[in-house]
Image: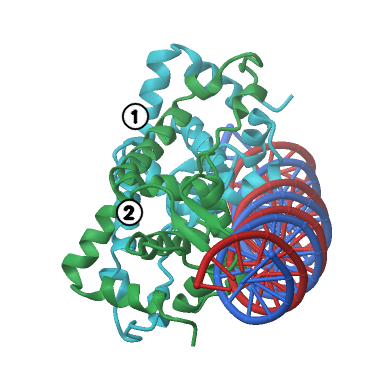
Chain colours: A cyan, B green, C blue, D red
DNA sequence: GCACGGTTACTCGGATAGCGCCTGTCCGAGTCCCGCGGG
DNA sequence: CCCGCGGGACTCGGACAGGCGCTATCCGAGTAACCGTGC
């Protein structure tokens, strides 16, 4: 899976306890990541309607929806694309008894089984929201959210 | 996901109703795939102990275990490798409040959530066996198994 | 004191190289079958 | 007729290029804040 997914998730989590826009460069500095590339990932999130961008001074990225309304699946799909990881190429079309017109996405038992597994994965991701993660962090590491918030808010060193 | 996974699964399914070795070239001809590359995938299955290989005339590949003892997860792991798709790079080590010695694979809530989702996926794959797929095929398309078996057994055209 | 316009600096946004993995291909080592010759 | 042996062909197995997507980078367009000026 693309590594950018991890960056996007961490970015969303940190944005969830910020009430004003944060520049991509600030987030990148926090994680020690290359700023231009993180910017690229955030653009993908913006296109998906997960974050909104503001140009100019005091600008940056900000969550578009409430953290509880952003599922992990939303973020993954925004970065990785909507297509499933396992894509049935319907190779049975070329088999001796294969019907070139046959619908092997629905009929092929292998396609069905792999799709079912991937559906379980997506269901799990859709059941967790960025808000849930934020609550977990606050419960496990009390005060760390405020600490990060203040670091994000302070002027660049 | 690698396309070779689909080929490996179809190969295992067809091998499940064969009682003698089938050459890689024969399987490749059945699906209209490049033979040398399918051979490469079958080698990976052989290293994983899913199929056994026999050299020389009348040789080929044969299932090493009973179809009911081969899960879809076994095949996927044999081709894709054992590492999970989402790998936590522990970028929190570089954060201002990050502990370089901290164990962020176990502590990071993002890593936990993604691992949980992937576990659901693997559980689903581990619950289905090649034998189950063969039974489904025989129930949905009666006689097709015997048809393929005879095609595999007949001499090359 | 207030409003306004120009300047400035800061931000996003898209277009551009580099690299690694999967796809696709090839030829050599090993092995089993088959036919022949001898006993 | 039976046994042993050599040739041959077939199979796997690993080593070798090509293409695509992710990673990483850069610079330009746009915009909001700021400051100075004029009223």
Circles 2 and 1 on the same chain: no
Q: Is B155 situated above or below D16?
A: below
Q: Give the letter of the chain under mark 1.
A: A
Location of residue A54 in the rendering, given as x and y in whole percent from the top left corner: 55, 48
Mark 1 Cα-neighbour bin, 10 Å: few <14, some 14–19, many ≥20: some
The residues bearing labels 2 and 1 have C-alpha atoms spaced at a distance of 38 Å
Depth order, front residue of D6/B148:
D6
Location of residue B21 in the rendering, given as x and y in whole percent from the top left corner: 46, 63
The residue at 34%/82% (across/down) is: A98
**Is residue A138 in sight in this rendering?**
yes
Location of residue A131 in the rendering, given as x and y in whole percent from the top left corner: 36, 31
Q: Is C16 situated above or below B47?
A: below
The residue at 69%/42% (across/down) is: A35
Disc 1 designates what residue? A132
Q: Give the letter of the chain under mark 2.
A: B
The residue at 59%/28% (across/down) is: B90
Depth order, front residue of C36/A30:
C36
Mark 2 Cα-neighbour bin, 10 Å: few <14, some 14–19, many ≥20: many
Q: Is B89 situated above or below A96?
A: above
Location of residue B61 in the rendering, given as x and y in whole percent from the top left corner: 49, 60
In the image: residue B144, left or right of residue B39: left
**Is residue A18 in sight in this rendering?**
no
Depth order, front residue of A121/A148:
A121
């Amino acid at each position: 899976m693309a590594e950018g997914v991890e960056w996007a998730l961490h970015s969303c989590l940190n944005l969830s306890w910020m009430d004003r826009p944060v520049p991509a460069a600030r987030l990148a500095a926090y994680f020690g990541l290359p700023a231009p590339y993180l910017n690229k990932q955030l653009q993908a999130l913006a296109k998906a309607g997960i974050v909104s961008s503001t140009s100019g001074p005091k600008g940056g990225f900000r969550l578009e929806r409430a953290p509880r309304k952003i599922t992990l699946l939303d973020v993954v799909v925004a970065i990785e694309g909507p297509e499933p990881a396992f894509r049935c190429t319907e190779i049975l079309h070329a088999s001796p008894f294969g019907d070139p017109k046959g619908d092997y996405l629905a009929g092929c038992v292998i396609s069905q089984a792999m799709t079912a597994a991937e559906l379980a994965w997506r269901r799990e991701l859709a059941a967790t929201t960025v808000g849930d993660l934020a609550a977990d962090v606050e419960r496990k590491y009390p005060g760390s959210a405020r600490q990060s918030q203040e670091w994000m808010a302070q002027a660049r060193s």
